[in-house]
């Protein structure tokens, strides 16, 4: 299928070259910033949950002897939230398509709050595991919903930066979790406060989300054009608003002709271009995890202790520095993703990750109880790893997956790619301590470095550049990749 077009679509680089006065700036539009900030609280929940358990685990082991004696129980407490997130992400795609982005967010907040309460009052490790499962369900739904909601509300010229704001909230949540871990180290019931306070942002987001609109693109799909126009009128000036509405109307009519009433899991793989898109999106999500990010974030205090720093407080303090670098790197990524581009940013990021992991590996190969130098080398390796990972592989996979799928498949494909992320996350979280114990910490980081090399090659071959493209242009890009360019048709990309 090819599409003939004589003028660039609204939001494309060609359109903005013709009408530079219609370009939207996030900082001059409080409405966009407000929507992004509230939706990104889902990212804060995501980040807080992944970060807080690393410090809480140190004190859970002190309270429950059976946890202290069992690597399996420790890994299960950490990874049960990830197992819940797999289920939440899988269901989240369907909830998004059937009930909308707003209701999906409200559902995630309720589930997360219940999970936080269960964790705070857990009388034994097994109830704690149930609470972690519930929290994971909420995080899984939020991980699908927030990027899609933000992307569908964002003008294409700032879409990468706004979606990356959600990633900033993830890293900010991780940083906040370490601060709270440190704040509660001397408080009775230490880990209960650490885990229970995570319900507060969920309650705040639930209350604010009640006053926010639904995604205008979802409203158009559901033939609720008037509501969609009311939302878009707060984002664009009159001239561009007319063009955006005309473009959405055409898309909606075309989709009504071609889309199925009920899109099923297997329908996704009947289209060659969607298969290619999912290969790129799902592959990025898998490599984000297998290159070790949540190994570092879940277990950074444990890794610091492995490197020779035995104090819980010192381990948490050094991990706080690592989390701070993660947040700062994400801020850099927000700027670079719409300037350098998604693909180039990923490649530079992965090259630095490989070097950092080799440094980490060497530090553990050379580690000696009589020489603290290699312990500090391990901390340097962790810091460099985060500094390279966060601007690129931290931000790019979520941004790319929010923009590469067609309208009618965006919810289900987004859910599937997030599920890939969480399944990969679970494998890493459930196996890291056991692999490190069996093979050694140095060889384990060397294995992860090898995976990062494979990730570099994957991005080089399978991931196209989507910087500055409208959703229409991205669809054309995949059609060109799947079937080749038709010389008789003017591509949107060439416009």
Image (cartoon, rainbow, N blue to C red):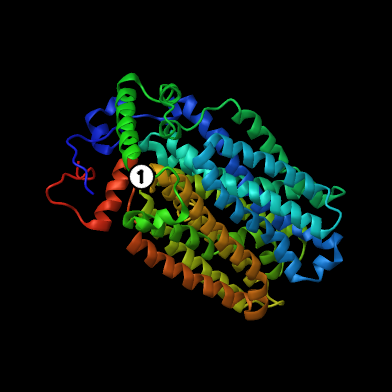
Neighbours of disc 1 within 10 Å: few (<14), some (14-19), many (20+) = some
**Which quadrant holds the C terminus?**
top left
Q: Position of residue 380 (x, y in %)?
A: 58, 63
* Residue 262 falls left or right of residue 422: left
Whether residue 339 appears in this view of the structure is yes
Residue for point 63% across, 34% down: 205
Q: Position of residue 99 (x, y in %)?
A: 54, 37
Q: Foreground residue, 391 or 157?
A: 157
Q: Residue furthest top?
A: 238
Residue for point 81% across, 71% down: 69
* Residue 494 falls left or right of residue 24: left
* Residue 141 falls left or right of residue 354: right
Residue for point 72% across, 76% down: 369
Secondary structure found at label 1: loop
Give the residue at mark 1: 339
Reply above or below: 445 against 184: below
Q: Position of residue 464 (x, y in %)?
A: 32, 55
Residue for point 85% across, 50% down: 189
Q: Foreground residue, 404 or 24?
A: 404
Q: Position of residue 352 (x, y in %)?
A: 45, 62
């Amino acid at each position: 299928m090819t599409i003939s077009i004589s003028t660039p679509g609204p939001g494309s680089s060609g359109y903005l070259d013709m009408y530079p006065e219609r370009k939207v700036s996030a900082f001059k539009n409080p409405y966009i910033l407000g929507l992004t900030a509230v939706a990104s609280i889902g990212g804060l929940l995501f980040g807080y949950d992944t970060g807080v358990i690393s410090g809480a685990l140190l004190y859970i082991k002190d309270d429950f002897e059976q946890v202290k004696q069992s690597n399996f129980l420790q890994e299960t407490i950490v990874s049960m939230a990830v197992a819940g997130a797999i289920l939440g992400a899988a269901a989240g795609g369907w909830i998004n398509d059937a009930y909308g982005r707003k209701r999906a967010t409200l559902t995630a907040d309720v589930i997360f709050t219940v999970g936080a309460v269960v964790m705070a009052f857990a009388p034994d490790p097994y109830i704690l595991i149930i609470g972690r499962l519930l929290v994971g369900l909420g995080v899984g739904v939020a991980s699908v919903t927030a990027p899609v909601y933000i992307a569908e509300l964002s003008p294409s010229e700032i879409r990468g930066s706004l979606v990356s704001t959600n990633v900033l909230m993830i890293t900010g949540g991780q940083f906040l979790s370490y601060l709270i871990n440190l704040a509660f180290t001397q408080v009775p019931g230490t880990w209960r406060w650490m885990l229970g306070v995570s319900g507060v942002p969920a309650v705040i987001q639930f209350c604010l989300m009640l006053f926010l609109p639904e995604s205008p693109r979802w409203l158009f799909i559901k033939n609720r054009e008037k509501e969609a126009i009311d939302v878009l009128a707060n984002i664009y000036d009159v001239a561009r608003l007319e063009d955006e509405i005309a473009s959405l109307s055409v898309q909606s009519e075309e989709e009504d002709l071609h889309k199925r009433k009920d899109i099923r899991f297997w329908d996704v793989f009947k289209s060659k271009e969607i298969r290619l898109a999912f290969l790129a999106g799902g592959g990025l999500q898998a490599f984000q995890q297998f290159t070790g990010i949540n190994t570092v974030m879940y277990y950074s205090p444990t890794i610091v202790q492995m490197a020779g720093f035995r104090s819980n407080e010192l381990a948490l303090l050094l991990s706080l520095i690592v989390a701070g670098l993660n947040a700062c790197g994400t801020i850099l990524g927000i700027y670079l993703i719409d300037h350098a581009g998604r693909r180039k940013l990923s490649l530079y990021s992965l090259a630095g990750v490989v070097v950092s992991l080799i440094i980490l590996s060497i530090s553990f190969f050379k580690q000696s109880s009589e020489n603290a130098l290699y312990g500090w080398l391990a901390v340097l390796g962790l810091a460099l790893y985060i500094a390279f990972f966060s601007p690129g592989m931290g931000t790019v996979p979520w941004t790319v997956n929010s923009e590469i799928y067609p309208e009618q498949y965006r919810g289900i494909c987004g859910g599937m790619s997030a599920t890939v992320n969480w399944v990969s996350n679970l494998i890493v979280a459930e196996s890291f301590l056991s692999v490190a114990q069996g093979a050694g910490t140095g060889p384990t980081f060397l294995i992860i470095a090898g995976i990062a090399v494979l990730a570099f090659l994957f991005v080089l071959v399978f991931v196209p550049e989507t910087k500055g493209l409208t959703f229409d242009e991205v669809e054309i890009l995949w059609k060109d990749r799947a079937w080749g360019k038709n010389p008789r048709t003017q591509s949107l990309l060439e416009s």
